[in-house]
Image: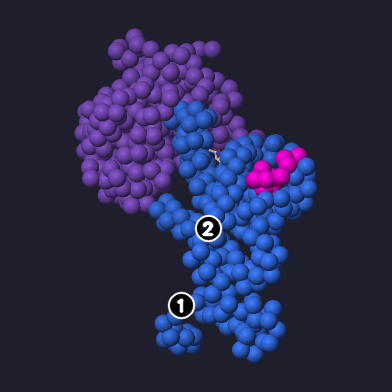
Amino acid sequence: MSSTLPSSSVLRFKLPLPLWGLMGGLGLWWLFTTPLWHTDPIVADFSPERTIAALVQLFSHGVIFPHITTSLRRVFVGLFAALVIGVPLGVLLGLSRPLEQATSALFQFIRMISPLSWMPLAVMALGIGDLPVYFLLTVAAIWPFILNTSAGVVAVNPRWLLLSRSLCATRWETISQVIIPAIVPHLLTGMRLAIGIIWIVLVPAEMLGVSAGLGYYILDTRDRLAYSELMAVILIIGLIGYGLDSVLRFAYQRWTHQG
Amino acid sequence: MNQPLTTSSTDNPLQATSIPLLAVQNLQKRYKTRQGTLTAFDGIDLQVQTGEVVCLLGASGCGKSSLLATIAGLQSADRGEVYLQGRSVRQSQPQVGVVFQDPCLLPWLTVAQNIAFGLKLKHMPSLTRPELRSRIAAAIDQVGLQGFEQSYPHQLSGGMAQRAALARTLARRPQLLLLDEPFSALDAITRLDMQTLLLRIIAQQQTTVLMVTHDIDEALLLGDRVVLMARHPGRIYQEWQITQPKPRLAHSLTETRCAILDALSTVMTLPT
Ligand SMILES: Nc1ncnc2c1ncn2[C@@H]1O[C@H](COP(=O)(O)OP(=O)(O)OP(=O)(O)O)[C@@H](O)[C@H]1O
Ligand SMILES: [Mg+2]
């Protein structure tokens, strides 16, 4: 077995493989931007050295915190709204074959429209401020919930439904106590996809008519020509996104191991 | 339509005077398949008296499971009626408990929670917390699963899981137990264990049982009456009343055993 693994020599460096990729990325970034040999001051502003310095400053002055909390609040409001609308809808679609067939074309159609296309409409209908952002995020995140929930409901073990019937459970008891717990892994997958999409849509959505949030702050740094800060914000966005995804991946593993 | 009285029930004056707990009248079930309709069983007349244990024997595919599921109200009959204490029923009833061949435990609930699940449903009489707890404890005691209340189904062996399933059904105190080959997935020793357990529970609670099995010894060990089904379509072919008191010794019923085996081999060669 072990003789078939020539790559095992790599493991001797005691660095986990994902870290190697990260180091490689960092190396490339540094190579293309470092002030050591890039004389263009704008390019040098994007370098890891200056970005790290800007990052430290952003945190030590605390300027970034209100933007992070604002963005996270929007993420959770959007996610929650998508969950509250998407999951019941998904359950309904999973339970009713005719309903699923009636709506599938419509949903596939709407799903393929980038949520950002709704931006002008959202601003016209909901005005300027948090509301259109919430709307866009909800629209973006609702599909993974609907699709994963309905797929989960369809895949529920028919034996459990038979059991539920043999115990004279009402329809609602079957849904709440058999179907919903049974689709938790599907829900967590949906949630993970939803957060991924929300986090991507958030930044452009915040570039319109709001005065706080990470997306807003990116435009702000650009306007101030503070490029190292811009890079720092990009880094923060990546870090938070990665963190959110990791938490959900962990939750998924915990649940499926136990179940 | 004539009353579906079996010859054996007239032998017993006590049974003849009371309404049977379960009466099945001219029951028929057909499945629509791609090859056309398949009659799973037809013209089934069966009565089960209170306190009686009836074992349903038959070759594979003769419609035993279908019959049990139809009696349990899990699927509709195409003709005929099922009466529970003289009342016609078409849906699953709280006073009927079903145990399947597989334990069917919900994997995200512990053993105790699985039992509680069956007790807390709206159709069951509502229980206070202490009542609920004592019911669960009693059911767990009954099946000998003490110490595994907080275990999850994947932590149980096949026999233990089936005990938990039995406890879930027993905790609801059903008047009629419908068992579909509940022990056939278990190894011989565990099966014997479970049969003894069931025998004790039946004696303790005076439960009425209709049990599907294809193990003749199991039928002889547990049944007051053994009903043999023939297939294509599934129908009742012959039945035997077993009067010997329980617990029985397997070798003491050789005569009935041979008779059943004889009938079984005849049934297998019947033209369809
Ligand atoms: N849902 C269904 N749809 C179509 N045909 C079915 C269905 N369920 C059972 N059948 C058919 O009905 C017949 C009786 O099946 P059933 O499961 O009742 O037999 P059984 O006596 O329980 O057999 P076994 O001893 O193998 O469990 C079989 O021929 C089977 O193929
Ligand atoms: Mg069967």
* Chain that the image shows in purple: B
Instruction: Name the residue that disc number 2 marks.
Output: A65
Q: Is residue B142 left or right of residue A229?
A: left
Instruction: Name the residue that disc number 1 marks.
Output: A16
In the displayed structure, B31 sits above or below A82; it is above
Foreground label between 2 and 1: 2
Q: Is residue A136 left or right of residue B215?
A: right
Which residue appears at 27% of the width and 24% of the height?
A: B206
Is residue A129 rendered magenta in the image? yes
Q: Earlier in the sequence, mark 2 or mark 1?
A: 1
Q: Which residues are magenta?
A: A125-136
Could you say which is closer to the camera, residue A176 or residue B107? A176
Chain holding disc 2: A
Mark 1, secondary structure of its residue:
loop
Could you say which is closer to the camera, residue B123 or residue B270? B123
Amino acid type shown at disc 2: Phe
